[in-house]
Amino acid sequence: MTWYQTGLPHIWLPYTQMKTANPPLAAVRTNGTRITLADGTQLVDGIASWWTACHGYNHPHIRETVQHQLETLPHVMLGGLVHEQALALARRLCDLLPENLTRVFFSDSGSVAVEVAMKMAVQYWLNKGVRGRTKMLAFKGGYHGDTIATMAVCDPEEGMHNLFTGLLPEHHVVDLPRDEESIAAFDAFLERHADGIAAILVEPLVQGAGGMLFHDPRVLQHLRRAADKYDLLLILDEIFTGFGRTGPMFALEAAEVAPDIVTLGKGLTGGTLPLAATVASSKIFDAFWSDDAQHALAHGPTFMGNALACAAANASLDLFEREPRLLQAAEIGKAMAPALGRCIGMNGVKDVRVKGAIGVVELEKIADMNALKAALVKEGVWVRPFRNIVYLTPALTIDEADLRKLTNAIVKVIENRAGL
Ligand SMILES: *Cc1c(COP(=O)(O)O)cnc(C)c1O
């Protein structure tokens, strides 16, 4: 395999200490919930490539739709041009989301979709003639991306606010209002600072990459009420939670709150092509609808609305319509709860929690991450723990046997304390 040896010295991998991490595994093929490695090993995939591949890998309907699009119109700029796939997708996303959300702005990554949401929120106030509302109110444990603007609204530790002091814009990052004490602190904070805030930004129900932390729908209802009281915008970042991951199509459905802006990404194309979206309400859009050219939204990624990616997303939505994905998400949760529950009480296990098709084993600590990762691969599964978290976000199409293989591997490795 010369491509591996000759290329490896030239690639820079994500979140990786390139000197000390286990060498990356060479993937040569994917199918369903399996990844085949160059040496012929098949791994059962527990995280669906950062939970993007919600229909499993290589779904024929997505492949055929993208193939057809590749032959007719792979890409045109959205500057001055539109195409059927982008318009159809925009309409379909608006049909799936709460009624007030009516306008879709496409981009190519979740981080950019969040940046666009933040820009929309700030420019919304400027267009309305309100100055000084430039800050976001975000939450500890949150994750919204890796770009400079989005790092600034992540959990301060995870977002490395100390490391990048001076570079990051300053926003407010506070505790979620989840109990009496934190609600009182949150309300008091708003009373003092609401004037400078453009929007509240939160991942609904599950804070994903920041630590797989769950919260109650009532938290979101409190945020909506607070936003209404102080005339703030509410941005829900559904990039992790969207497309059935927490059970319903979107997590916001469980809370029955209508946000002003929603961001989508990750599962949007069923894990095939990069695409993200920022969906705005009519209230937001109306503030940009003007005879004044300065009031236009000042953003435009080169590849926004890429036709191949939009075709993949449309095909993915077809599959959500035709196949029982949300039922499958619920079934996965039902199976994971008792299966991962076997870890409760084991030495070093802090918590086990399951919501929708998300299963989490939180450990006291992981002392040797390389050893833990290697032990999981040895069990024939692809799971990528981070910090003190071992989690599963499998394809919603995973069958019982593969899911059992995943949970058994995690239970066994934790029981044997590999790397712990
Ligand atoms: C992954 C993620 C992002 C960032 O998306 P990228 O495509 O990696 O830029 C933003 N918000 C949430 C909630 C995410 O899970």
Image (cartoon, rainbow, N blue to C red):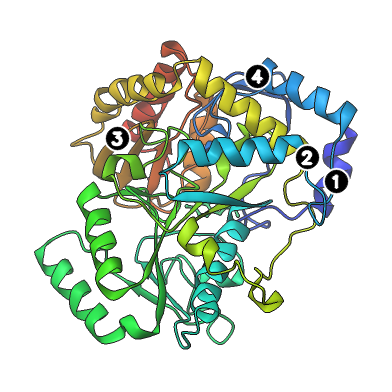
The quarter of the picture where residue 42 lies is top right
| Dot label at residue 76 | 1
What is the spatial separation of the Cα atoms under label 3 and label 4, in whole angstroms?
26 Å
Q: Earlier in the sequence, mark 1 or mark 4?
A: 4
- Picture quarter with the C terminus: top left
Check disc 3 and report the residue beneath it. Answer: 354
Task: Name the one closer to the observer, 360 or 81.
Answer: 81
Question: Of helix, strand and loop, which one carries label 1?
Answer: loop
Q: Amino acid at mark 1?
A: Val
- Against 331, residue 167 (above or below) is below
Q: Is label 2 within 8 A of ligand 1 (CB to nearest ligand atom)?
A: no
- Picture quarter with the N terminus: top right
Kindly report which numbered mark, 3 or 4, lies closer to the viewer in this rendering: 4
Kindly report which numbered mark, 1 or 2, lies closer to the viewer in this rendering: 2
Check whether the beta carbons of the residues at disc 1 and disc 2 lie within 8 A of each other.
yes
Q: Earlier in the sequence, mark 3 or mark 4?
A: 4
Q: Earlier in the sequence, mark 4 or mark 2?
A: 4
What is the spatial separation of the Cα atoms under label 2 and label 3, in whole angstroms?
40 Å
Residue drawn 42% across the image and 33% down it? 249
Q: Is label 3 within 8 A of ligand 1 (CB to nearest ligand atom)?
A: no
Check disc 2 and report the residue beneath it. Answer: 83
Question: Of helix, strand and loop, which one carries label 3?
Answer: strand
Q: Amino acid at mark 3?
A: Val
